[in-house]
Image: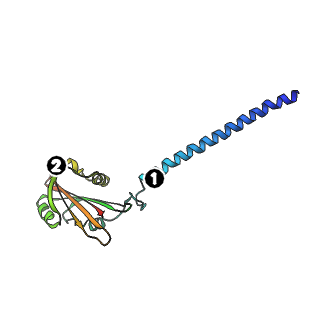
Amino acid sequence: MSSTTRTAPATARSRRRLLLAVLAAFLLLLAAGVGGLYWVDDDLRHPKPDSGRPGAWMTVDRDEVSRFAHVTVPVSAEDIRWGYQNGFQDDFVVLAFRIPQGELEQYKSALPASGWTDTSYVPQIDLDGFQHIGAPDPSTTPPLTCGDFYTPGPAKNIGTQVCVASRSDGTSQVWVSAVHTP
């Protein structure tokens, strides 16, 4: 009987170790699964640049952004910055530059924008876009004058907003945002 009692505790210890090993493996797999879900969620919310996924900022040239927005960048423009964000259904572009103060009225009159109005409100999506390209924040540059226009497209219309503000250095800052619209 003594040989039976010696193997019983050893068998019980082996079972406990096996149970602990299985439990530890389960917990590790669970942690890996949860971590994987966070990684996938972060990848969906913040796609890599040039991935072509919705929300990704794409590398395109300035002329393509200008054509999308139906806005020309004057030859005299300085500090030109632009960005193109791929959307799920609607793409979005931002463009910012400075022009000499004396050219501002001529530039505005060449745009098909209607109803230039003073405002301090800039939509958050536009602010995010301007921040992404490193342009000055238009919401902190009063007085801000904005006009908008729509351009029919082959598949979708383009809604463009142009905002301008005078700067103390004798130039005017121009901000352009455009998006596909239904």
Which one is nearer the viewer's eye here, 90 or 129?
90
Question: Can residue 80 be seen by looking at this rendering?
Answer: no
On screen, residue 26 versus residue 120, left or right, reads right
Q: Position of residue 132 (x, y in %)?
A: 32, 53
Q: Which residue is mark 2?
A: 142
Q: Position of residue 72 (x, y in %)?
A: 22, 67
Question: Can residue 123 be seen by looking at this rendering?
Answer: yes
Amino acid under label 2?
Pro
Marks 1 and 2: in contact by CB < 8 Å? no
Amino acid under label 1?
Asp
| The C terminus sits in image quarter | bottom left
On screen, residue 143 versus residue 59, left or right, reads left
| The N terminus sits in image quarter | top right
Q: Position of residue 168 (x, y in %)?
A: 14, 50
Q: Position of residue 153 (x, y in %)?
A: 28, 70
How many discs appear?
A: 2
Decide which of tag 2 and tag 1 comes sooner along the chain: 1
Q: Residue furthest top?
A: 2
Q: Residue furthest bottom?
A: 154
Q: Which mark is residue 31?
A: none
Q: Write down the quadrant of residue 106 in the picture.
A: bottom left
Q: Which residue is mark 1?
A: 43
Q: Residue at x 26, y 70 (%)?
A: 152
Q: Residue furthest right?
A: 1
Query: How far is disc 2 from disc 1 in space, using C-alphas?
Result: 37 Å
